[in-house]
Amino acid sequence: VTAAAVLSCTSVGVASEHDHGDDHGEHMAVLDLVPHDAVTHMAMHSGDWSDPGTWMGGMLPGADARVHIPEGVEVEFDLPASPRLMNIRVDGTLELSSESSTNLFLRTMVITPTGSFVAGSPDRPVPDGVNAFVFFRSDVPVEIDDPNDPLQLGLGVISLGRVELYGQMREAFTTLAEPSVAGDSVLILDGQA
């Protein structure tokens, strides 16, 4: 899988709520990306993603699954890595584990107005050494005339609800302490000398 984009909660904190505005057509187009009748795996009870008892039929979501987390249901994604999912519709709560590193692979996640996508909290951010990543699949072709996505909104996270990601401060980039030249086998970074 090549990641088209990566969400990582190894940053400070992000809390976001979408202003729903009056664009009913666009709102419905977003919801149509993950319609109820296309769901292959639905969480029936709050619990861990890795627990078959969380899922209708007792089967964990597999490759190309279309997942639904209904309103009032909270699921903690606690696997080291997911199969390559197609999409997730979050009407309830999807939380990335703060206890162990996780990698969630999917094409599209839609967080509806009643939904929440969470990693860490202001009081308990994802700790140092634990990574919570979401990778967006680029191996699924984008169809120009896709009747389920006429506005070409898919591929990534679309939030009409709540997104809260809290982690550790990270330096996004750094500079070299001294210029490099072709053939250098060691680079000295600012702050390393």
Image (spheres, helix red, strand yellow):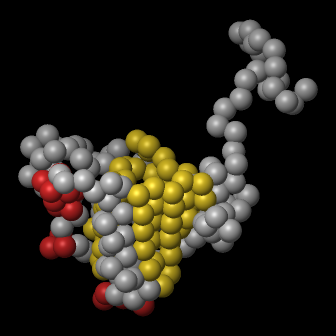
* Residue 145 image-quadrant placement: top left
Which residue is at the front of the view, 131 or 31? 31
Give the image location of residue 124, x and y in percent.
68, 68
The vertical placement of 193 against 87, above or below, is above
Q: Can residue 59 be seen in this view?
A: no
Give the image location of residue 140, x and y in percent.
28, 48
- At a point 33% along the width and 79% down the height, the residue shown is 71
Q: Is residue 20 visible?
A: yes
Q: How many marks?
A: 0
- At a point 19% along the width and 73% down the height, the residue shown is 36
- At a point 37% along the width and 76% down the height, the residue shown is 92
On the picture, is 8 further left or further right than 181?
left
The vertical placement of 84 against 36, above or below, is above
The vertical placement of 46 against 122, above or below, is below
Give the image location of residue 116, x and y in percent.
42, 68
Which residue is at the front of the view, 164 or 105? 164
- At a point 60% along the width and 66% down the height, the residue shown is 120
Looking at this view, name the residue that lies furthest to the top: 181
Give the image location of residue 2, x and y in percent.
43, 43
Quadrant location, the C terminus = top right
On the picture, is 145 further left or further right than 171?
left
